[in-house]
Amino acid sequence: MRYVMVIDTRRCVGCMDCVVACKTENNVPEGYNRDWITEEVRGAYPQPRLEIRSERCNHCARPPCVSCCPTGASRVHRGGVVLVAHRQCIGCKACLAACPYDARFTHPDGYADKCTFCHHRVDQGQLPACVSVCPTHCMHFGDLDNPESEVSRLLRSRAHHALLPEAGCQPHVFYLT
Amino acid sequence: MPIELTTTRHNPGIDPTLHVWGWEIPVYLFLGGLVAGLMIIAGVRLVLVQPRERQAMVCCTIGPLVGLTLLSLGMLALFLDLSHKLYVWRLYLTFQITSPMSWGSWILLLVYPALLANALTHLPEAIPSVARRFHAFVAISDFILARPRVVIGIGLANIVVGVALGLYTGILLSALPARPLWNTAILGPLFLFSGLSTAAALLHGILVLSFKDGERPAFADFLLSSLARWSEGRAPDTRIAPLLTQADNSFLTVELGLLILFLLGMVSSTAASQQAAALLLTGPYAAPFWVLVIGSGILAPLTLQYLELQNRIRHTLAPAVLVLVGGLTLRFILVFAGQESHWARVASLP
């Protein structure tokens, strides 16, 4: 099993419902974000190119945050989801420096924190909070190892890219273009 | 093609540029390298020099004691950096083979006994007053010195663990591929040789403080009187000063060579590495890098110590102070600039 997230950048309008849903679902402290919206504009008038992306931890297949963790607090959970065991984290911040996406932060309580793909919901057969509230249905979540899953079908049929593939982490959040 | 990137993320310590490590980590890396250097120098002297000649030798007597103190200060700095301090014991419930920090925490457990054994070998000569009060120290020292193989074992252990510690302080950073400035294997040897040069400079500085009155810089009087009280007037053997100066110049030369290779590798690599190198060469860290690290941290002490070896100027504290300031600045610059370096944050839009 390999959980991935697929986000259709042609549908995303950057409304930030995913951000609000994440903060509510996971009690993310004020001033911190587990997910966020990035707008990238290339080129100039009359032919600018805009891509709006809902970004988060990429739950990499080769996660440098896991390999650098000195206590084993950062680990790979079922389905390839990268998690942090709060009571094992010493707050050394090596994982924050190791992430090329800057997706982690230090929680005010001292431990490293990040997106969990809402594994507590997924384990109960639900979708991650951000996916479940998206008003344009631009976000998709599922098992990449299942060729019949929606995410597999989308990645087969649509052009897509991941963020910073050159960093060598094999990210598992994909953006349809 | 113009590119505009905006984000709604504003996580503290992460945005606009990463700054999760403050003064504690550079101080720890500096002190760790310095202690590694002290261990290697003391280890080499233990292995190569006869006991009688070692007795008043600063690198075998005061060096390990200074090392123990500095290492403890470094560990304190490391502890202060942790944001989840109560869970620090978790480090020692596991060994994570892919984590340099896990290797480092276990290496530090080996450093203390090796350094302690090193210090105990010549403790009666280093602090006679303590040895007179606690006879056990004299007995331990006599026990070790009566067994040349044990002395050589302690020396070799200090060399091996010292090299591991010195390399680790660089590998800790170089194992983080997300930061192009750090992601080079040269950082390990660079920090090792920087540690060796700062250690030789520190020992040389202590020796200069113990020179005769006429040769002593006036501003060192206070420090010298403290040192004399501490060692009960038994000043360290100053004959080793030229040797330390020579060694320091060798370490500084290798360090300069490694720094050049480090920068050459960066500017001839990917765009991300070129941007990272520019932070040091022409960017916000250029002034301290060129002035404090290259200029006054390496080139100036190299010149001064060359003139000292030629007997054209007196041995002074200046090279030692310059090398120590340069070594500390190097750690600060690499830790801070490294956090600012990053992969290009824009995606490749098809």
Image: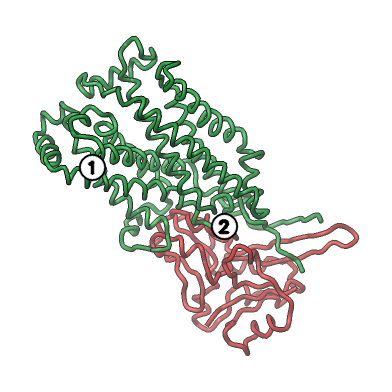
Q: Earlier in the sequence, mark 1 or mark 2?
A: 1
Q: Which mark is residue B116?
A: 1
The quarter of the displayed image where residue B308 is located? top left
Kindly report which numbered mark, 1 or 2, lies closer to the viewer in this rendering: 1
B40 sits left or right of A123 in the view: left
Q: Position of residue B120 (x, y in %)?
A: 19, 38
Q: Mark 2: which amino acid?
A: Ala
Q: Position of residue A1 (x, y in %)?
A: 52, 83
Of all chains, the one bearing label 2 is B
Q: Residue at x 58, y 65 (%)?
A: A168
Of all chains, the one bearing label 1 is B
- Mark 1 packing: few (<14 Cα in 10 Å), some, or many (20+)? some
**Chain letter tied to green:** B
In the rendered image, the residue lying farthest to the top is B214
Residue tagged by mark 2? B178
Of residues B15 and B290, which is closer to you in this image? B290
Q: Is residue B128 above or below residue B268?
A: above
Q: Mark 1: which amino acid?
A: Leu
